Amino acid sequence: MHALIDGKEIARLVRADVKVRVKEFSEKYGKKPALCVILAGDNPASKVYVASKEKACGWVGIRSVAKKFPASITEEELINEIRALNEDPGINGILVQLPLPKGINEENILCAVAPEKDVDGFHPMNAGELMRAGATLEPCTPAGCMELLKRAGVPLAGANAVVIGRSNIVGKPIALMLLRENCTVTVCHSKTRNLKEILKNADIVVSAMGRPKAVTGDMLKEGAAVIDVGINRLEDGSIVGDVDFESACRVAGAITPVPGGVGPMTIAMLMKNTIIAAEMQNA
Ligand code: NDP
């Protein structure tokens, strides 16, 4: 028996909360909070992501501004564009859609975004704050995973949590967030020797490795809460997570599907970060 952690529904609840705050903000300041999404080049997947971010802005009442540039834009030109947006009081959040065209250093671009407008939570200052005490603007996907665990009522304090993956955008921040909630955290990666053994003791599993169906039911502890961050496209075009849902759902106590789990949460948390940024800048 397992409970499905419904990311679509929880994302809707998060957006409903954001919508209330956006309305209050708009009434108080006579303007809508605004999110600027920067898209350089014409990566088809990026275009889809940008469109869904624009749609989400519409749902919650955030003003969406799209800045589109050709793949030929230089790093210096892009940094100048970001600096102008940093100075623009009408823009509260800036998101640079990744990946960037060849020749542009992502790190330099992410560092150019003013930390108080960094709604992706990728700026080193926000990453540092996350390590110290918890940042005001936290990376959206890991924050979305935490929201799923909390709203699903998964007990966190004292739980053994295993994170698979150690990237700066998912694995590391989620490990810090779980630690902050008093979980005992183990971080696994491609050099981990005994993943199966480690997982057997996990009350919570967050998988962010990008390996289709690599975590199977026999690897899990009975009743574990499983958050599947992975988005993997198979040859037939279908999308699957890192977790083999069919076998895992027979063992897990609670589990997210792919799609419909973590995915919708990422954009919902982006909306939340945008209203947080707008409130902070106008406080
Ligand atoms: P990265 O490729 O940056 O990191 C993958 C991590 O998984 C690395 O730390 C790697 O270890 C580890 N890993 C790879 N293979 C194994 C293995 N066999 N056993 C244990 N660990 C392994 O990916 P991201 O963190 O950017 O993304 C992870 C997944 O999450 C992807 O599928 C991505 O598409 C998805 N994603 C989903 C989002 C959403 O909104 N739902 C948002 C962002 C990402 P090592 O460090 O040793 O190489």
Image (tube, helix red, strand yellow):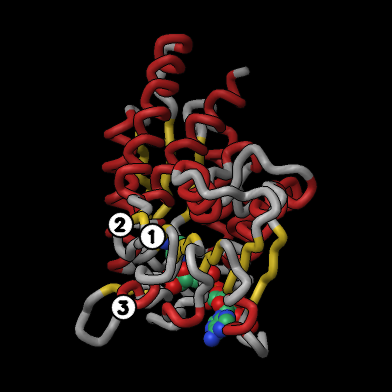
Which quadrant is the C terminus positioned in?
top right
Circle 2 packing at 10 Å, graded few (<14), some (14-19), many (20+), is: some
Q: Which residue is at a point 44% across and 83% down the rendered structure image? A: 214
Earlier residue among tags 3 and 1: 3
Circle 3 packing at 10 Å, graded few (<14), some (14-19), many (20+), is: some
Q: Which residue is mark 1?
A: 256
Amino acid type assigned to the residue bearing label 1 in the image: Thr
Above or below 282: residue 192 = below
Earlier residue among tags 3 and 2: 3
Among the 4 quarters of the image, the one containing residue 75: bottom right
Q: Which residue is mark 2?
A: 260
**Picture coordinates of residue 217, whole percent (x, y):** 42, 78
Residue 130 - label: none
Cα distance between the residues tagged 1 and 2: 8 Å
Circle 1 packing at 10 Å, graded few (<14), some (14-19), many (20+), is: many
Q: Are dots 3 and 2 in contact, CB under 8 Å?
A: no
Instruction: Specify whether tag 2 is near ligand 1 (CB below 8 Å).
Output: no
Q: Which circle, 3 or 2, is nearer the viewer? A: 2
Q: Which residue is mark 3?
A: 233
Q: Residue furthest left?
A: 236
Q: Are dots 1 and 2 in contact, CB under 8 Å?
A: yes
Cα distance between the residues tagged 3 and 1: 17 Å
Q: Which residue is at a point 42% across and 29% down the rendered structure image? A: 18
Among the 4 quarters of the image, the one containing residue 54: top left
Q: How many marks?
A: 3
Q: Are dots 3 and 1 in contact, CB under 8 Å?
A: no
**Picture coordinates of residue 251, whole percent (x, y):** 42, 70
